[in-house]
Amino acid sequence: MMRLDRWLVTLGVGSRSQVQKLIRQGAVTVNGVAERDPAASCDTDTAQLALNRQPLDGRLMRHVMLHKPAGLLTAARDKKQPTVMDLLPESYAAIGCMPVGRLDKDTTGLLFLTCDGELNHRLLSPTRHVDKTYLAQVDAPLTPADVEAFAQGLHLSDFDAKPALLEIVAPTTGRVTVQEGKFHQVKRMFAAVGKEVTALHRESFGSLMLDPELPEGQWRELTDDELRGLYADAQMEEP
Ligand code: URA
């Protein structure tokens, strides 16, 4: 249960005084009935909201799959540069929908965002071993020795990368599966075998696969099955 004014503020409808004014004017209905009391207690799981007769999505929990384009930072906000949050409605940031992990600015592909902080935290935990799969274009032909080096685990300047699966898809295209997610990890693993990554695209994160129907720059909410899979990856009960 939540006060109506607080619910509307959390959804990003406006400031506390703005939403209180809207409520007093009768612009807000709850389950089809005008509610003029800002302090009215609402069941945020079931109550149907409308503002000026337009239905308003009142959910406080959202889970999103985004097909990240190159050129955007993976961050909640940045003073100078555009971020992935610019692709979502403002209310998503207002309710705390955050990226799970980071993709570099020039990396494309699957990004998962959620309001569930515990799910976010657990999916990134090193003890959880969530697989991430990337398609990498590199500047020189890949060799069986590279596959072997990835399988052994590579020594990077500040840490030893755990064994990773590298499949050669085409002479200069590799599919890499890693369980870690250190800064520039995949690029640095290729650099360790003398190759530069010229393009990097994430195909999957745990059980979640990038929807091939989802164009770059677009997003959609997860299906129930996709969400169930991620909670299982995180070894969490679905709320
Ligand atoms: N590894 C990288 O080097 N960059 C990414 O964006 C993701 C994984």
Image (spheres, helix red, strand yellow):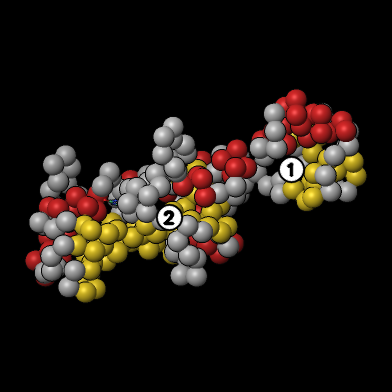
x, y percentage for residue 117?
51, 41
> Compared to 168, does 237 lie above or below?
above
x, y percentage for residue 38?
82, 30
Mark 1 is on which residue type? Thr
In this image, 1 relative to 143: left or right? right
Total count of labels? 2
Residue for point 75% across, 25% down:
17
x, y percentage for residue 231?
51, 54
Q: Nearer the viewer, mark 1 or mark 2?
A: 2
> Compared to 109, does 32 lie above or below?
above
In this image, 191 relative to 22: left or right? left
Q: CA distance from mark 1 to mark 2?
A: 30 Å
Residue for point 70% across, 37% down:
13
x, y percentage for residue 35?
88, 37
Q: Which mark is residue 44?
A: 1
In this image, 197 relative to 239: left or right? left
Mark 2 is on which residue type? Lys
Residue for point 45% across, 43% down:
83
Q: Earlier in the sequence, mark 1 or mark 2?
A: 1
Is residue 45 visible to us here?
Answer: no
Q: Is mark 2 within 8 Å of ligand 1?
A: no
Q: Quadrant of residue 149?
A: bottom left
Residue located farthest toward the front when viewing the structure as drawn? 80
Report the residue marked by disc 2.
68
